[in-house]
Structure formats: C-alpha cells, structure tokens
Image: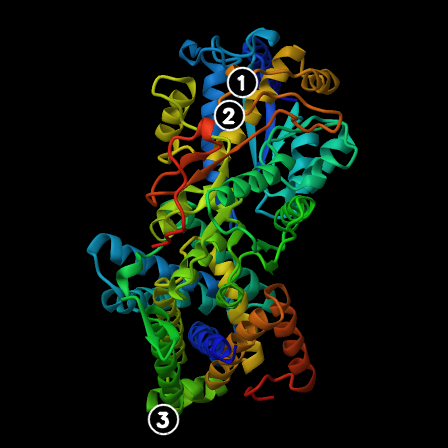
Amino acid sequence: MTLKHVSGLLCAAAMSFGLASGAQAQDKVVKIGAILPMSGGTASIGAHAKAALEVAMDIINNAHPELGNLPLAKNAGLAGLGGARIEVVFADNQGNPATGQNQALRLITEDKVAAVFGSYQSGVTLTSSAIAEKYGIPFLNSESVAANLTERGFKWFFRTTPIADFAKIYTDFLADMKATGAKTDAIALVHDNTEYGTSVANTISTAFKDKGQPIALDVAYPVNATDVQGQVLQLKDKKPDVIIMISYTSDAILFAKTMQSLDYKPAILLADDAGYSDPSFIKAVGKISQGVFNRSSWAVGPSGSPSAIIADMYKKKSGEEMDDTVGRQMQGFFVLADAIDRAGSTDPAKIQAALKATDLKPEQLMMGYKGVKFDDKGQNVLASGLIIQLQDGENYVSVWPKANAEKAPTLPYRGW
Amino acid sequence: MSFVLVQVIVGGLLLGAVYALFSSGLTLVWGMMNIVNFAHGDFVMLGMYVAYVVYTLMGGGPLLGAPLATLVLATLGVVVYFALIRDIMKGPMLAQILGTFGLALLLRYSVFWWFGANFLSMPQNIVGGTFAVAGLRIEASRLLAGVVALLVTLGLHLLLTRTSLGSRMLAVAEDATAAQLMGIRPDTMQAIAWAIAAGATGLAGALIANFFYIVPTVGETLGIVAFVTVSLGGFGSVPGALVAGLLIGVIESLSGYLIGAIYKDIIVYVLFLFFLWFRPQGLMGKM
C-alpha cells in the first residue's frame, strides 16, 4: 500500500467522522411519511395537499405566536422533543391502492418514518394503513370517508375527518329544506365504483332508509369516465327531486359539462365533498354549477383569526384558495404532530398512546370540528361539518345549519 | 322513452366519431411500420393543451386552435420519428414498447411541470351552445368534433388509397427495401406518416378539449379507448378504426343508459374478446 493510498483512506475516515459529528450537532428531525396522489387522475389534490403540509411544517417548525391557541404554533419545533423539527417525506400513491401499499412499506422500512399520514382516496388508505398496522406504526388519516376504514379492529389507525355524521347532515339538511317547502321525496345517488364512491353511497342510503325514505335511484359509474351522457339522460328520465353526487374531480367536471349540454337541472344538487371541493373544479365549471350544495368543515373566519391567517399562508404557497379537503388534511397533520410532541419521543407505541389521549378543544383547531377525541376504533367522535353552497359560481358560502350560516340557502339549483 | 334512446344513440355516434379520429393516428403508425405508440394518448393530451394555450394567450377559438394543434403535433411527430422511432424500429419489440412508453411519461410529466396538476376547461361559450333539433339536444362542440372527425378519417383513407403519396406510403409499409429500389425514400414516407398520425391526433385533442376536461393525465383515460378501437377495427386499418370507433361509442352510450354505466366496459370488452376470438385481425384488418 503506497503512502498515497494510506493518506487517501485517512482522509476518507476523517471526512466520515466529520459528517457523523456534523449530523449529531444538527437539530433533531422527526420524519413523517405522507402518501398522497401526486400523479394520476387526482394529482391536483396531491399538489394542493403538498402545499398544505408545507405550510403546516412552517407553522410547526417556526415560531408563529399570531396563531393563538393552535398547538405547536407558538414556538419553533416540537417542545416535547427538545425543539425537534418535523420533516415530511412525500410519497406518490398514483391514486392506486397497490402503489399506496408499496409506498407505505418503503416509508416505514427504508425512510424509518415515525408515523404515516395519508392517503386521500379511501381505497388507497385501506391498503397503505394495513402496512402501518402490520409494522406497528401510527397511521393518521384526515380525509378518507369510507366507513369500513375504522371497522377493521386496527390499533394504529386514527381518523380525524367526520364519517358517519355526514349522512346525518344530509338527512337533517334535506328535512329542513322540506320544511321550507322544497320537494325532497325522490333522492338519487350518483357515485363512482371506487371504495370511496360505493362506501359513501352505502352510508348515505342506509341513513335515509333509517329515516323511512329509501333512495329512489342509484346511478353507479366507473371512475375517470370518458362519457356520462347515458347517466345524465337516466336522471333526466327519472326526474329525482334531489341528486347527491359522490365523485372525484374529473368525473365531477364531466357531469357538470354534460348536464349543461343535455339541459338537465335537478331541483337540489348536493355534492359529497371530494371533487366538488377541488378549487380546479370551481375554476373549470363553477360558472355552470351555481347553487350546488357541498359538505364542508372549513370556514375561513374573520380576518386576523388563525384560520384566516392560515388560509393566507396557504394561498401564498399554492396560489389556490383554501378548501375543505386541504383544511382537513392540515388539521389532521397538526393532530399527529401534537401527539408526537406530547409523546416526547418517536417511539411508535408512545405516539400511539398520545394519539389515544388526544383531547383538543374547538379553539385549538383550524377546522370547524367540535374537537378531536378518538374512540376505540380510532375515529374522531367530535368531527362535524356544515353545508356550503356555490351561490355565485366562484366561492362557497356556509348556508346550514343556521347557527353557522353566512347566507340563507337558495333553491332551486341554478346551474348556468 | 324511445326519444331518449335516439338521444343516447346520437350522443354515442358523435362520441364514437371522435374515438375514431384519435385512433386513426395510432392505426396508421402501426400499419406503416408495425410500431405500437404508447404515447398516443399523450399526443391527444398535448393537442388539448395547445388548444387551451391558443385560447388563453390569443383568445382564439377552435378555428385557430384546431389547425395550430394539428401543426404543432405534426411537427412533434416528425421530431419524434427522427429522434426516437427511426432508431428503435430496428431494435427488438421491447425497445419499441419501452421507447414509446418513456416518451409518454416524458410528455405527461413535462406538462405536469409546466401547467401543474389542476384541471382546466375551455370556456363554455367557445363553440356556441347546443342545438335543439326536434327535441334532440346536440352540443355544437360535439357536433363539430364528430363531423370533423368523420371528414378527416375519410380523408385519411382516401389519401392512403387514392393518391400517389398514399401509394408510396403503402409501398414502404409493404416492403421498404423494394420501395427504395423504386426511388421512394422510406425515411421520408415514414416521417410523413408520423406527421399525419400525430397531426390527426392533435386535431382530435383540440376538438375534444371543447367538451372535456384538460389535465396532464387525460391521455391515460383516452389512450385505452384508442387501443381498444384500433384492435377492434383491425390494426392498420383506417376505415376499421372509424367503424370500431362509432360502434364503441354507441355501445358505451346504450349500455351506460340501459344497463348501468359500471357494466358498459364489461360489454365493450366482451365484444372485444369475442372479436379477437373469431376475427383476430379485427373488423377490417388483414391477416
């Protein structure tokens, strides 16, 4: 071995020492894996969610005293872990359950994340959370609504978004509309054939059946449809009083366009969040969907309020208005970060215990939930929502229940 | 009831004509040089974006957007031919599949990067409204797309069968070496075929953009339809693509209305398998 080689080796050794000590001197980082649809038919949702999580990271990792009672905003980093910073490792699920599963595996085994967050589509959440369960890593879901997700007896799965009570919101809202003279007897459900579409359609039809008003017409269609003329004509033929749409963005846009071209307007068009909350839906076809009702837990609040400040930060980051979906995602992320902070550790079991002990009050939240508290199944029992309406074709306003309404609901559906 | 059925069938025919138009490019490239272009759906997507850009930047409607999309995509077709296809044609089948598939991803994610993932839509009034004829409702944008699609597909067929350029192209398709001996340059002919195929696809995209949403992944949704149309009609046959496109459009509409939309793909694909079984060459393909 020549001298050159030896000195080379010494150099390398010195460098690796330097690197190691450098890493030690750095602040501690808590990695959270986020599985989102960054490509595929719902890529717009993934892009918005990424911006939202980056804003959430900014709020957690830097001092934001202006955000009042919001946990983790006041000081920089997680106080419970000596000021550790949160870092999100983004993974693309391509809107595909199999890909979501692989990404969960990669995040847990290779990136060694402390917890997993995701995955938007109920079908993807179903598979990716199963991997987290197997490895004993906390999985926080903030936006998938298929009821069965919390019926699997999982110990590591927590969901902050409202699920069962949205059906109650619909039955109560329509009962109120009926009381004001609207016809709400025949209800049609229009939904895609994904986990989300079929599960939500089931939950809603059960809720109406229990009220003694079975669903009159069930129109199922394949997701990412190329054409929906047949379905719109079917609706036009059967003339239901109320249509409840359960669709992702692409199909929601196609339905709006096709309903206009075939000149079909139901008296009441009620949408189940998802595509109808995507800002690109409003930009693309808001003007021909005037008067559509939607479910939401997001209200921007008066200027200067924490929710308004967050909405501003989000708009600066993404160029989009804050919507219900990204709001629920940010809220879920805060709940997870708060639990890690209280756990004071990245040990999965301690985070799980902290999530179970979560008890956030409305004033600590950015969303209009009554709080965050998980039951044995991991479902947030204090999640709640309201009904919003796209009255002018550009911005949703809250219209129900009366206590939270900015404006009164207007009927019938105007369309274009 | 019967009235609605007529509406369903008319809607299906118009949709089918557009399917035919964007499938004809795929079938032409196959007929000329036995290449399956997996980037085909993304060519449609690019055509849609060209039309959208023409509208937002220049305020131009389909009168400007459609020819420009044709031109841009035809140019792209020539570039793709010389930069990629000419070389991978000589390689194994796997190279062709991966080459065009890679091209598809390159195009799709370039558009992602440039335009973002948001859904876009042409304004509603760009192709004036809807005609109500005897109770039937026909959207002007769909009618325009359907009629142009029919004309262009027929034109393509005539070009291939009735002109000297068409004969030269077919000669190259038949036997490139023999054609070369007769003074026809295969390179030029194949580049022209790519220009025509990509141009027709761009035109289809620009026309579809008037009534469909625009998003970087739309090629995935539409590309599959093109493959089914081409296999049903017969690989390499332009009239086959036309008939198959119309057939699929009507079957989709009818089964979507009568049986339920989630079953319409089952019916289309059962028919598709049935044809592959009895006529593996497709409706009008040659063995």
Residue at the (47%, 48%) spot, across then down: A182
Residue nearest the observer in this picture, A32 or B138: B138
Task: Name the image quarter holding the C terminus of chain B.
Answer: bottom right
The answer to whether B282 is drawn above or below residue B220 in the figure is: below
Closer mark to the observer between disc 3 and disc 2: 2
The label shown at residue A362 is 1
Tell whether A276 sits left or right of A213: left
Question: Residue B16: x, y in percent?
Answer: 47, 76
Quarter residue B269 falls in = bottom right
Of marks 2 and 1, which one's residue comes earlier in the chain? 1
Rendered location of residue A331, percent (x, y): 53, 25
Image depth: mark 3 or mark 1 in front: 1
- At 34% from the left and 87% from the top, the residue drawn is B165
Q: Position of residue A253 (x, y in %)?
A: 44, 54
The verdict on a common chain for dots 2 and 1 is yes
The quarter of the displayed image where residue A34 is located: top right
Q: CA distance from mark 3 to mark 1?
A: 75 Å
Q: Chain of mark 2?
A: A
Q: Is residue A209 visible?
A: yes
Residue reaching furthest to the left: B58
Which element type, helix, strand or loop, lies under badge 1? helix
Give the residue type that dot 2 points to: Gly
- Chain letter of mark 3 equals B
Label of residue B162 in the image:
3
Q: Nearer the viewer, residue B116 or A179?
A: A179
Frontmost residue, B39 versus A278? A278
Q: Residue at x 55, y 21 (%)?
A: A334
Q: Are marks 3 and 1 in contact (CB under 8 Å)?
A: no
Provide the residue designation for mark 2: A368
Decide: is B161 above or below A409.
Answer: below
Whether A381 is drawn above or below B232: the answer is above
